[in-house]
Image: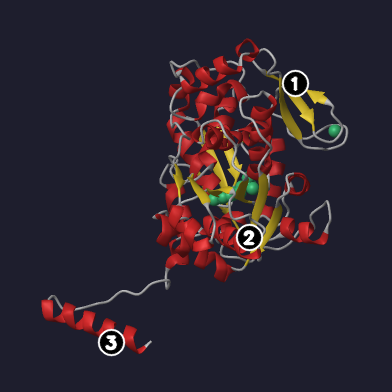
């Protein structure tokens, strides 16, 4: 077992592996610490083979995840215990997108291809498995939409009771694709930050595993699997740059942690990728702090179509700033109009239809390409974290539909009209 304890990110105080998320001494966030020195007897080749022989899901990286009892072997024992296998999503070479942006090598990591259509299945897999190890019977969360669907689905798959708390004004598709799993769905009249505050209070009162509150240290580790997968799919190599959406900053910072852990172990060579965070202008606390040269984020009140990224007071904001700066990246915000264009650009050039968060990420990639921040011969990974079918309104009005009578003449007349229009233009 490689997992050792919890440690405060601020003062280094250590704690046992409990359902605990804040330091008693300084209130700093806690993080899981591992001792990887003895993994595979320190033999990198053996470690790679062990990973490659693992199941086709995130549990192939179990040596790097914070589960105590259940480290699964290739038999996939744990996999069956957690019900819905997440991960092993496609990494697609996107030459048409690269051409459109004047870049050489762009890859799309399509994490919409998870069981509930977002990357949240990675973090929930880990948190729910840890919740079960710790003896909880109920899992819960504060969500901007995708986490809600994931917690509800893993509750159903694992036979755990679930409570999900969302802002009442979420997209209808997100509400429908959550409620269907038979969860206790609570719509709170307020912003995500209000929902989060409520859940923090409830976590102190109830004997529930709030995946992103009292189980946050374990939950967050699940995002590292996205980094491991990208590296493995590139043949145990690193990209030069990753463009990643930022809400609380957990995914962004843990991707960097994942690349760091594998580099430290010698599983991958080379320097860590530049990490570019992506936010919407209507909720850009991290991008604003980055632009102002600050190392803290001032809270904002969100107003953007990218509701899944609408966290005005990001828990991991300062650490996200640190990752962006120390990796040679940045944090950029784009307008709602650019987000819609981003969704459309990605769909038209790759066949991948993303939700608004992916529109943010694609629009930031475009900005970085146009501004020259990306070297034209870099290998860039665009991290797409959610499915377009969950935010359908964002796509409406981005294309035309021609309506005709069911005759060949009508269709040909249309063609002629179109040709005439084009020649006039
Ligand atoms: C689709 C999508 N992408 C990215 C994120 C960002 O997650 P984090 O809070 O880890 O920054 C979220 C968070 O809810 C999300 O739903
Ligand atoms: Zn501390």
Q: For mark 1, what is the residue?
A: 16
Q: For mark 2, what is the residue?
A: 368
| Disc 2 from disc 1: Cα separation | 43 Å
Decide: is 308 above or below 89. below
Q: Residue furthest bottom?
A: 424
CB under 8 Å between discs 1 and 3: no
Is residue 255 visible from the viewing direction of this image? yes
Secondary structure at numbered mark 1: loop
Q: Position of residue 292 (x, y in %)?
A: 82, 61
Q: Position of residue 113 (x, y in %)?
A: 43, 43
| Disc 1 from disc 3: Cα separation | 73 Å
Q: For mark 3, what is the residue?
A: 420
Residue at 75 percent of width and 61 percent of height = 288
Task: Indicate how the structure is coloured in the image.
Answer: secondary structure
Q: Nearer the viewer, mark 2 or mark 1?
A: 2
Q: How many marks?
A: 3
| Disc 3 from disc 2: Cα separation | 37 Å
């Amino acid at each position: 077992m490689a997992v050792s304890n919890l440690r405060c990110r601020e003062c280094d105080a250590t704690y046992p592996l409990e359902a605990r998320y804040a330091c008693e001494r300084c209130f700093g966030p806690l993080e899981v610490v591992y001792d990887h020195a003895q993994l595979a007897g320190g033999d990198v080749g053996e470690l790679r083979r062990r990973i490659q022989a693992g199941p086709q899901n995130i549990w192939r990286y179990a040596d790097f995840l914070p589960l105590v009892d259940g480290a699964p072997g290739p038999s996939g024992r744990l996999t069956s215990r957690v019900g819905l296998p997440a991960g092993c999503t496609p990494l697609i070479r996107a030459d048409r997108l690269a051409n459109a942006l004047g870049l050489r090598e762009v890859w799309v990591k399509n994490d919409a291809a998870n069981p509930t259509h977002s990357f949240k299945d990675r973090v929930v897999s880990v948190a729910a498995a840890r919740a079960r190890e710790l003896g909880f019977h109920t899992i819960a969360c504060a969500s901007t939409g995708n986490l809600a669907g994931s917690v509800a689905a893993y509750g159903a798959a694992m036979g755990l009771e679930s409570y999900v708390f969302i802002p009442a004004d979420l997209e209808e598709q997100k509400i429908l694709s959550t409620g269907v799993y038979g969860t206790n769905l609570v719509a709170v009249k307020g912003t995500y930050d209000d929902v989060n505050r409520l859940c923090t209070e409830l976590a102190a009162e109830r004997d529930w595993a709030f995946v992103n509150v009292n189980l946050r240290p374990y939950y967050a580790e699940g995002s590292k699997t996205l980094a491991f997968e990208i590296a493995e799919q590139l043949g145990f190599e690193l990209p030069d740059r990753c463009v990643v959406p930022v809400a609380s900053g957990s995914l962004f910072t843990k991707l960097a942690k994942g690349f760091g852990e594998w580099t430290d172990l010698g599983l991958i060579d080379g320097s860590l990728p530049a990490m570019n965070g992506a936010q919407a202008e209507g909720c850009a606390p991290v991008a604003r702090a980055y632009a102002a040269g600050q190392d803290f984020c001032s809270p904002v009140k969100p107003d953007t179509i990218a509701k899944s990224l609408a966290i005005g007071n990001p828990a991991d904001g300062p650490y996200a700033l640190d990752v962006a700066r120390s990796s040679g990246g940045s944090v950029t915000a784009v307008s709602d109009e650019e987000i819609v264009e981003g969704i459309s650009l990605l769909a038209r050039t790759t066949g991948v239809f993303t939700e608004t968060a992916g529109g943010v990420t694609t629009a930031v990639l475009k900005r970085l390409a146009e501004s020259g921040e990306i070297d034209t011969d870099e290998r860039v990974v665009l991290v797409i974290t959610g499915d377009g079918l969950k935010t359908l309104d964002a796509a409406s009005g981005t294309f035309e539909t021609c309506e005709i009578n069911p005759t060949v003449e009508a269709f040909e007349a249309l063609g002629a009209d179109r040709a005439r229009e084009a020649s006039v233009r």
